[in-house]
Every structure is written in structure tokens, then in C-alpha cells.
Amino acid sequence: MHGVRSEASVLHLDLDAFFAAVEQRDKPSLRGRPVIVGGTGGRGVVATASYEARAYGARSAMSGGEARRRCPPGTAFLGGRFAAYSITSRVVMDQLRELSPLVEQVSVDEAYVDLAAGGHDLGTEGLTALGADVKQRIHEATGGVRASVGIASSKTLAKIASELDKPDGLRVIPAGTELDVLHPLPVRSLPGVGPATGDRLSAVGVRTVADLHERSLADLVTLVGQAHGSGLFRLARALDDRPIVPDREAKSVSAERTYATDLTDLGRLESEIRWLADRVVTRLQKDGTAGRTVTLKFRRYDFTTLTRSQTLPQPVDDARTIAEVARRLLAGIDRTGGVRLLGVGVSGLADYVQGDLFAADDDLPDVDTGADGAAEGDVVPDDPHPGPTAPVWHPGQDVEHARMGRGWVWGSGLGRVTVRFEGPRTPPGPVRTYATDDPDLSPADPPDWRGTDDQKSRS
DNA sequence: TCTGGGGTCCTAGGACCC
DNA sequence: TCTGGGGTCCTAGGACCC
């Protein structure tokens, strides 16, 4: 039947209380004791609670204060060592890649493996032995971290299976028995059904997956929307043939910070924006990517949260431009009462490094050339290099998103001008903000960009 | 000591275009 | 004189996940 695999060939692996487990591995004195990672700051929340801490009611996402109230004296509250978690995660993922070339990592502590691509015996006994073996190898390779494993005919079922026997769990759901496992479960245990959807379903008497199965597609769509409704309809029937996709490309990069006390000073807010933009840019440049949409996230003292975004004509990856756009977005928001959190993000990512690979492709459409596109009266600076082409300045134009020859410019009146260089057939590159802090910058007086385009190499 | 930080996907309305 | 019908892009917000 379309929509289902005929064999239980998907493995889902989830590391148990991962951050806490790494801490207990590295500090023997913590073993057997309640450990909380995260929630140490004034406004922090728990990232991971060890199973000993869960016995006292501590949970992920709980405020640090609440966790302190619940846990006994002697509980370790730790800030977190993300480099150590990341290294351990890599060890685990390497083990999984021994099983199959198709491994989809979904977070530091979670991954799917397509066992069909690994040439394994997909009988129930073989799968059970394989699952036990992976768990054992991960335990040894990491020096003591435990994992829960689920194996089934789809991602959703494998994920549900890995939850069923946690911690240190192993569950195989043989093909054909999916509905027997699924139907008694509460709908809230389905991935994608959170508090809001759970409440809506509960309000119409749907509490288990069996209840869900009785509802028509039209009912579910009316209740929770087209995509979610049809997703739930399929889930209740164990219809899920989503492939395992290794190496998903990131779609956005962001950084945000909650302040110990609410901020009110505009200068401080602007310096925080610059700091956040720097963090975003560090990661963008490490990944060799840039994005067109800059988003500012803003949380007030009362936790009301809003976002403001602006899409630019070309991808950006430099901190000054991103911070400048975010700063202007901030200017349009009422800050009365104080700011609890600020965030800066970039989305609409374009991989311009990969773009360069296509630059030699003759099928690529021509980039508009400055000479052809220049209007009468344009000032065309001498081209100082054979490489990047000189931008064309449109005299007298107030350049909000104005195309300038082979470069783009926008943001006049900001005290600086942003230009992107393009050579013939050059794919879209990152936007650079060129230094000219002259507040009276005039279109008749183009910024001195000569020699500055190599300050950050494009490759 | 109420409510982190980094993401993904979806919806809905308006602009704009053919 | 009650005024189409898509399709795409952009913006804002919300649900959800780890």
C-alpha cells in the first residue's frame, strides 16, 4: 500500500538525559545523584534532568527555581559544557554511520537511520539483535552514555517506539503491527501534538489514537488546519513514508538572549543587537552562507513577543549590515516597560560558495551589466580591478533598494552605504557595508570603496 | 527566582502580477 | 455598479521539537 514501508527498516535513536549523562560520565561523584543541566541563571530553565532528578519531579523546560524547589539538597545544578556534548554526539553519530550511509541527525541527541540502505537482516529477531548491539557500542564508545532505540516501518513509529521503553530502551515494532501499538496511546504522545493541539482534540473527545482514527479527514482539517489535520489523519493509520534525509541544509541562523533584568536603555539595546549580529555572522561565515531576510525578535517585560523582519535585495552576511537593519526594525517598536529578550536572525539562506561552482556554467542567465543598465547621467567610477565590477551610482536617487550597475546599494541616509559587487556571471554574493560614516554622504559623492572589497574574501 | 536558545513548519492577509 | 482568479512574495504570529 502506498504510504507505508513493508518492513521495519527505520531506526530512531535518542540519547537518555544526554547532557546530564555526559556530566555523570565525566564526574564520578555525580553518578547516582540528581543532576540538573541548565537553569542556573536568574531566568534560566532546565535543559536536561538526570533520571535521579526526574524522580523528584524535575523536567526539561522547567524554570530553575521550580527545579530547585523540587530537588533535594545535594542536587547538582550545572551550567552545561556544550563542547563536551558536541564531541560525544559526534562519537554517537559515527557509530550510526557504521550501520548505514543514510543517517539523519535531527539534534545533538537524536537521529534516524535507514537500515534498508545498510543491507541488514530486517527480520524481527535480527533487528532486535542489531538494536541491542548499537546500544552496546554507543555505551562503550562514549564511555557510559545510554541510548534508547526504536525500530519500525516509519520515522514516526520508530520515534514512538524509542520512547516506549526509555531509558535504556529497545523496541521493535514489526511491520503489520503498527496500529496495535499506536491505537491505545494518548494523542499527546504523537510527535507534533503539543499542548494546543492536545487541548483542541481533547475538547472534542479525542484522547487516544484510536479516538483519532474514528474522525473524518474533514473534521480534523476543520479542527487543526489543513496540513496538521491531514497529518494526524495519516498518523492514526500509520501512514508515513517520509525518507531519511542526511545533511539537511540550515534554513535560518539566529541568536537571542534573555537579560537577567529588563533593558530600557536604547544605547544598551543597540550594543546588544551588534553583539547578537556578530554571533549570527560568525556562524553564517563558518557555513559559507548568507541570507536575504533579517529578523529582529523582541520580548517585553510581560513576555509578549513580537518579530519584525525585512527582506533585502541580496543575501547579507556581514555584521554591520545585519545590525543596522535590526536596529532600524527596533526603532519601530514600542519599548515601554522594558525588554526581556532580544534576538537577531537571518533566513532565506543562499549558499553562495556553492553558487561559485555554477559561475562557470554558460547556461546561467547573464547578470545585468552596469554599462547596459546605467541611466543617462550616471557616474561610473573607473573599474579599479579586473575582478569585481564597479558599481554605478545613480545621482540624485534616494536609493532604497536601488539597483546600481553590477552592485546593489540601499540604505542611503544611514551614514553609510551598502554595496554588493558582482562580476559577470558571478552568483549572488554577500552584501558588504562599506565604511563611510559621513552622515552627509551624497549620491554625487560615491563612497570610496576602492580596495575595500577584498577586506573579506568571498571565497 | 515563572517561562532558554536554537531551530522547523504552517497559516493568513496584503501586495503585486498576469 | 457589487466587482475574477490564480500564483508568488513578504510579513507576523503561533505551534512544536530538542
Image (cartoon, coloured by chain):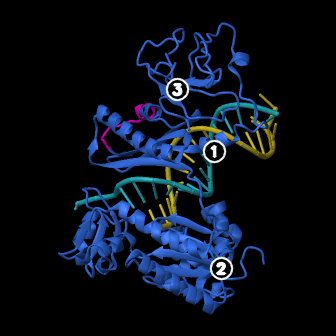
Chain colours: A blue, B cyan, C yellow
Mark 2 vs mark 1, CA separation in Å: 33 Å
Which chain is disc 2 placed on?
A
Q: Nearer the viewer, residue A129 or A51?
A: A129
* Residue A216 sits in quarter: bottom right
Q: Is residue A56 left or right of residue B15?
A: left
> What crowding class fits label 1: few (fewer than 14 Cα within 10 Å), some (14-19), or many (20 or more)?
few
Residue at 64% across, 84% down: A178
Mark 2 vs mark 3, CA separation in Å: 51 Å
Which chain is disc 1 placed on?
A
Q: Is residue A390 at all visible to an observer of this figure?
A: yes
A126 vs A90: above or below: below
Residue at 69% across, 83% down: A7
The earlier-in-sequence mark between 2 and 1 is: 2
> Residue extending furthest bottom?
A125
Same-chain check, marks 3 and 1: yes
Q: Nearer the viewer, residue A54 or A16?
A: A16
State if disc 1 and disc 2 touch (CB < 8 Å): no
Circle number at residue A354? 1
A417 vs A377: above or below: below
Residue type at tag 2: Ser
Residue A322 placement (x, y as % from top left): 47, 35
Disc 2 target residue = A9
Verify whether residue A158 appears in magenta: no
Residue type at tag 3: Asp
Disc 3 target residue = A453
State if disc 3 and disc 2 touch (CB < 8 Å): no
**Judging from the image, what secondary structure is the residue with disc 1 in?**
helix
Q: Nearer the viewer, mark 2 or mark 3?
A: 3
Residue type at tag 1: Gln
